[in-house]
Image (cartoon, rainbow, N blue to C red):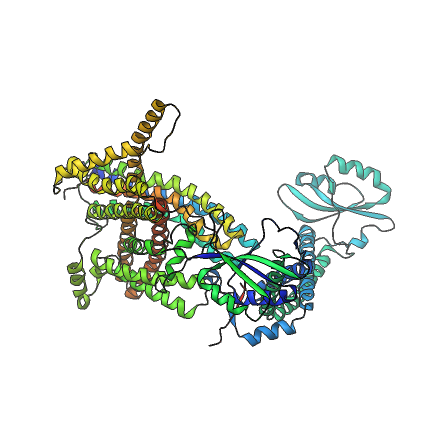
Amino acid sequence: MFEISQGLIFAVLGAASAAFLGGIGSSIGVGIAGQSAAGVITEDPEKFGKLIVLQALPGTQGIYGFVGAFWVLNMTGLLGGTPLAVTMDQGLEILFACLPVGVGGLLSGIYQGRVSASGCGVVAKRPEAMGNAMILSAMVETYAILGLLATILLLNGITLTP
Amino acid sequence: MPVPKMLKVHIVAHADYKDKVIEKLHDAGLVEVESFIEIPEGLHTEDVDTGDLERRLADLTFGIEFLYRFSEKPNLLESFFLPRYKIERKDYDSAVKEFDFSIIEEAKELDQTLSELKNEETRLKSIIQQLQPWENLGIAVRDFETVRTVTEVGIIPTEAVSEISQVDHVHVEIPLSTERKTWISVTYLKDYSDDMETIFRKLDFQKVSLPGGSEGTPAETIEEARHQIQELQKEREKAEERGAALAEKRMHLMIVYDHYADIKKKHDVRKNFASTEKSFILQGWIKKEDLPVLEKELSFIDEVEISSYEPSDIDDVPVEIENKRAFKPFEVITRIYGLPLYKEIDPTLLLFPFFIVFFGLCLSDFVYGAVLILLSVFALKKIKIGPDAVLLFKVLIVGGAVTMVLGLLTGGWAGDLTMYLPQQLSFLENVRESLTVINLLENPILMLEIALILGLIQVWVGILIRGYMNVRDGYYLDAIFDQGLWLLLLPVGTLTLVNKMFGVDVPAADLMFNLSLGALAGLVLTQGRYQKAKNPVVALGKKAMVGVLSIYNIFGYLGDVLSYSRILALGLATAALASAFNMVAVQFSGAKILGPVIMVVFLILLHLLNIIISSLSAFVHSGRLQFVEYFTKFLEGGGRTFKPFGSRPKYVKIKEED
């Protein structure tokens, strides 16, 4: 039983890295955007509502990472408290399947944060262009979404026998 | 769908009526006045000095912004939606009439006072900070030099303290000492000055001069400074009360700002007129349907001539979009992208069904849809919001309704919340299961296929619209070759691919295959038809090459369609997050005290969070699919917005009298 479940270690590593890599990406992204937003607020506190939305946009990578982690926990039965047997091969497969959402989220989060930060500058001068700033920022997020999709499709292809 | 027709107008009138014409045009708000590119021969333009108005507006802006911090703040939601305050016409008029610019002077003076108070407070605080180590020193500053003695204060290394204490004829006080540094005062007879200087140098004694200008002991000075700070704070409170009192008039400032901005607009518009001695002419744009209204408005003048023209190709025609009431909210989405060009079409109706379905699929939750509708209705009824935000919430109401339907089909009820319901309500779980057609979490591949098919449909419709525009404009061959062939290739090619690569049975597979080949051949043969060269052989070669290269567009379309997979991914993220939240919240139900209460509170908070995040994503990404994948097929965009000359208030809106 013990030997057969060693794969679980890698599955957990996969879930953890999906969550923490995405989380780092979002933390940095939201951080960068927040600094710009704070700069705008010093001059113009009335724009707070708009800026907080722009700041929140690079936050989704962390959520996607969490969703990926949740998926792994769910399929390995870790959530229910009775983990399934995961072989070494399966464990490694799960680990690798988690990379798209993790690494994709890490990098896209940072760059989306930069675009959001520039977007804060747009809103400072032309508040009516809020929609444009949001769309520009969302362009970067596409690749985090595709990463999440790849991870889920990959995980879906791995079957664990109870 | 079509962009409303515009006409170019010239209005000529006697110079005596200039002010009246401007007033009428301003009130009617129908004509966008444009400057002449070339002033007609013999006419001149007017120089208008608005320097005084600009100064007043700048003053008012200062006042409005300065008083913001003393006034009642709008809540977060309201600040997001830039409310315009609705006021009665009589209040507006009286505010303008009774306004006294001395309030600006008061605000400026108050600003000055506040910054002086702040500076003084900072200075005192820094004195306190510098004197803190000397607080225990018993010698007053006025006694630092007496007839025969001198007192030096300074910092020396702690290990040197014993040495300096042993010097004869010296009185030492140590108000503060740490492991490494000691704050020390040394009192000695003036006769020994030279000796002491040598000792000081030897022991690395750093002289300090105490700040504050006070003559008492440091403790007294600190006490005094603290007292002064208290006084300053009292003064500041008084100033802030004054500010709050002034801030009550902030609304008046806003009204007067809008009033003066209107006056300035009426002055500025004159710069565009061309005049002779006795008459003037202005040029502008008007919606074709509004022309009779304009003629009626100006009919009170005998000597006025309004002539109108269809726009020519070189004109930069401003664009307005108009939709039926029910679809008006969706103009918000079109406007985010920007308006179409005048010769193009208004895409609002064309994006509506796609946007709303994509939005619903990204959320796909029965409960979330219902909450979204409730929140939007609440916002429309209870929160002060600007006109754009009203439209936005109407979009969200329709989106919420679609989300509810799609939520039923995909089995999203706040994720899988029905699974955790108590016995009496467990029938809901059966209802959920029986209504579910596709479970996202269990069968994501099926949903992915649906998303991609929807994408293919939207891309196809986009090409179809372009084809329609070509037919409308009389470019029949372009419509057949550039759009018709792709319209054929996309569906039959997809079916052929699915058949050959995945072995799925499709009806009339051979026919599909042949049609695909035919369409491909047609593209190769026709796409180079505009290539030209002097040498016929070169020309033929160019045509062939461009024809073959056009096939690469397949990858462009493939990429477009794959981009729609985000619909599945966002739907999954919403559902998975909801399930995770349910699981977390249910953990609390076991707690001994208040377990169920905590669980319910957590459920509400977490799901509300998910609704906000997921709706934001759903809105932004559904929008993106319209702009990047759809509009690019048939729109160039970048039309200039039609901005008729008229009142466009920044802060206040006068209530319409019914």
Q: Quarter of the image containing the C terminus of chain A?
A: top left
Identify which residue is drawn at 47% across, 56% down.
A50
Q: Is residue B276 left or right of residue B355?
A: right
Identify which residue is drawn at 49% across, 62% down.
B82
Q: Position of residue B260 (x, y in %)?
A: 62, 64
Residue B434 in sight in this render: yes
Rendered view: B394 above or below A71: below
Identify which residue is drawn at 84% across, 41% down.
B192
* Frontmost residue, B174 versus B118: B118
Rendered view: B2 above or below B196: below
- The number of discs equals 0
Q: Residue A22 falls in which quadrant of the image?
A: top left
Identify which residue is drawn at 58% across, 49% down.
B37
* Frontmost residue, B414 versus B542: B542
Q: Position of residue A110 (x, y in %)?
A: 42, 41
Q: Quarter of the image containing the N terminus of chain A?
A: top left
Q: Is residue B57 left or right of residue A40?
A: right
Q: Position of residue A84 (x, y in %)?
A: 18, 44
